[in-house]
């Protein structure tokens, strides 16, 4: 078990600690509510496939202005060890996030989810309407209503993924003759471009923090991460191939909901988000020009402004 520690000067008040959930140690980042906001609605943040709680660190100090904030590492990701009997599926993660809320003592909370975390959050909100006060979905991995649309990738997907595929092929072909390191760096830059419009503009502290998620891992964590990536991806693919259950969940969500996405997202096409918003005209949505897959990392100030503006409208409407 790790002792609690400040995550860095760049993120005042954010603490890296361990929470016991169902007899296991779970890594969380916690930002206590600011002065005067202790009675505000708590906020639980769920990362996407291959991510960790660190993906939320840029917005946690800002979100804490209205209540306590916790971001969690799902089993097999970040610093939460996958156990032998973990299903590592979307459904198992839905149950796990609810366990985390119970361990925190939160009976009702706001739920933010990015990518796979957005899919998890949608299913949880549909299944447990009495627990979720408000729902924020950031480039959520929600399926199109017609699976055949998966066969026609969006232009942003082609532009974003092609360099990664090409550099991966090159690295495989040339790695044995000493060219691998440069190509790994090139591929990493392309991966960063899935999140950031300008990787050179990202502050070094955030890049270092993201890198630590992998450099500090032991062999068991690394093996669990590989298994979680494979298993969770298959679980998402199954839901996308047969989307009826997820579409029913979207229709069943009772919580006020905000969707945030971008036209330059290579992983979740803007047209899918617009389709979801047409099916739920009571939800508020912003599909932002030239934004990518993780607005809370790419443009945290914009994320906070949109979330707070929407939350204020919801509070005033009650």
Image (tube, rainbow, N blue to C red):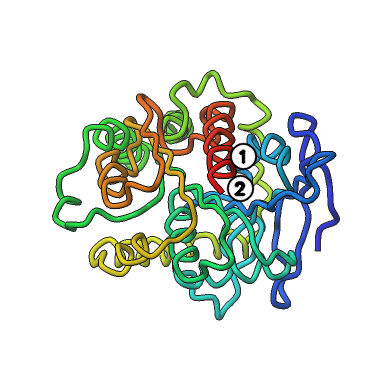
Confirm whether residue 177 shows in the render.
no
Image mark for residue 262: none
Mark 1 neighbour density, 10 Å: few (under 14) some (14–19) many (20 or more): few
Disc 2 element = helix
Q: Residue at x 53, y 60 (%)?
A: 225
Q: How many marks?
A: 2
Q: Position of residue 243 (x, y in %)?
A: 26, 64
Residue 84 in which image quadrant: bottom right
Left or right relative to 27: residue 243:
left
Please indicate whether residue 75 sits to the left or right of residue 293 in the image: right
- Name, please, the residue furthest toward the bottom: 85
> 269 above or below 122?
above
Q: Do the residues labelled 2 and 1 touch (CB within 8 Å)?
A: yes
Instruction: Tell me the residue that label 2 is attached to.
Output: 214
Which residue in the protein does label 1 denote? Answer: 211
Q: Position of residue 136 (x, y in %)?
A: 50, 47
Which residue lies at the image location 54% right of the left edge and 33% below the top edge?
Answer: 303
**Residue density around tag 2, few if under 14, some if 14–19, many if 20 or more, within 10 Å:** some
Q: Nearer the viewer, residue 189 or 41?
A: 41
The foreground one among 10 and 286 is 286
- Residue for point 49% across, 59% down: 121
Residue 214 at x, y percent in the picture: 61, 48
- Where does residue 145 sit, x and y in percent of width and height? 21, 57
Report whether 185 appears left or right of 17: left
In whole angstroms, how far apart are the C-alphas of marks 2 and 1? 6 Å
**Which quadrant is the N terminus positioned in?**
bottom right
SS for callout 1: helix
């Amino acid at each position: 078990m790790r002792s609690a520690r400040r995550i860095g000067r760049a993120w005042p008040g954010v603490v890296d600690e361990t929470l016991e959930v169902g007899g296991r140690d779970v890594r969380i980042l916690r930002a206590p509510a600011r002065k005067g906001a202790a009675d505000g609605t708590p906020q639980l943040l769920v990362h996407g496939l291959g991510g960790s709680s660190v993906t939320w660190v840029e917005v946690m100090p800002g979100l804490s202005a209205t209540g306590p904030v916790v971001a969690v590492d799902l089993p097999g990701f970040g610093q939460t060890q996958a156990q032998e009997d973990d299903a590592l599926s979307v459904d198992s993660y839905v149950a796990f996030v609810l366990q985390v809320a119970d361990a925190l003592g939160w009976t009702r909370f706001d739920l933010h989810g990015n990518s796979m975390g957005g899919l998890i959050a949608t299913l949880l909100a549909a299944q447990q309407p009495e627990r979720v006060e408000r729902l924020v979905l950031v480039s959520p991995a929600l399926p199109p209503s017609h699976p055949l649309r998966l066969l026609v990738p969006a232009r942003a997907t082609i532009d974003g993924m092609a360099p990664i595929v090409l550099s991966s092929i090159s690295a495989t072909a040339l790695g044995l003759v000493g060219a691998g390191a440069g190509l790994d760096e090139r591929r990493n830059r392309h991966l960063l471009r899935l999140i950031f419009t300008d990787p050179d503009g990202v502050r070094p502290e955030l890049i270092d923090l993201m890198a630590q998620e992998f450099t500090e891992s032991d062999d068991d964590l690394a093996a669990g991460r590989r298994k979680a990536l494979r298993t969770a991806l298959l679980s998402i693919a199954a839901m996308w191939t047969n989307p009826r259950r997820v579409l029913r969940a979207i229709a069943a969500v009772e919580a006020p909901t905000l969707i945030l996405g971008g036209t330059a997202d290579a992983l979740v096409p803007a047209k899918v988000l617009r389709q979801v918003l047409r099916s739920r005209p009571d939800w508020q949505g912003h599909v932002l020009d030239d934004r990518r897959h993780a607005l809370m990392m790419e443009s945290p100030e914009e994320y906070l402004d949109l979330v707070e503006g929407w939350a204020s409208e919801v509070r005033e409407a009650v």
